[in-house]
Image: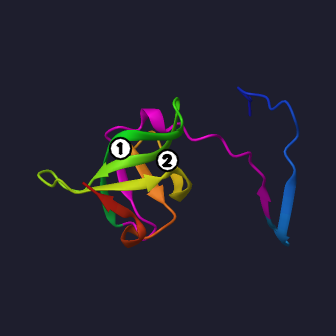
Amino acid sequence: MVRVNKPFTAAPVISLQAGHSVITMSALAIDLRRTAGYIVADRRGRLVGKVECPMYGTAPDVPDALSVKSGLFSRRRRMVPADAIEQIDGSSGVIGLRVDRESIRSFL
């Protein structure tokens, strides 16, 4: 097997049970500025909507939340805070949340 990329540091391995192990991974900062058009789903996999744009608050160049539009002709939008995001899949354009859609605040 030829390795294309070589890690700079050895990854520690955590053993859960005999024969099962997990390699720890570092958390990368989520770049919300490039998520316009992504589909957002809650923790149960239910559709929340489509990202309209990032929302800024505490810092002028780092988004704190996403404005998510619920439907094609709907005026309803939800404000999804950055800390409610579980994962972002850039290849499929899907954002998974760690909360239910009912817990996300609506505005406008």
- Which numbered disc flags the more N-terminal residue, 1 or 2? 1
Residue 71 vs residue 41, the one in the foreground: 71
Which residue lies under the disc numbered 2?
Answer: 88
Please state which amino acid type lies under the numbered disc 1: Tyr
Is residue 101 placed above or below 37 in the rendered structure? below
Q: Residues within 10 Å of mark 1 (few under 14, many from 20)?
A: many
User: Magenta region: which residues?
Assistant: 21-45
Residue name at image x 77 percent, y 59 percent: 22
Secondary structure under tag 1 reads: loop
Q: How many marks?
A: 2
The answer for how far apart the CA atoms under marks 1 and 2 are is 9 Å
Q: Which residue is mark 1?
A: 38
Residue type at numbered disc 2: Ile
**In this picture, is 12 found above or below 103?**
above
Residue located at (52% from left, 64% from top): 98
- Mark 2, secondary structure of its residue: strand
Closer to the camera in the image, 45 or 31: 31
Percent of width and height locating residue 16: 82, 70
Question: Residue drawn at (79%, 28%), measured in percent from left and top?
Answer: 6
**Figure colour scheme:** rainbow
Rendering coords of residue 62 (x, y %): 54, 34
Q: Is residue 73 magenta?
A: no
Direction from residue 76 to residue 43 in the image, left or right: right
Marks 2 and 1: in contact by CB < 8 Å? yes
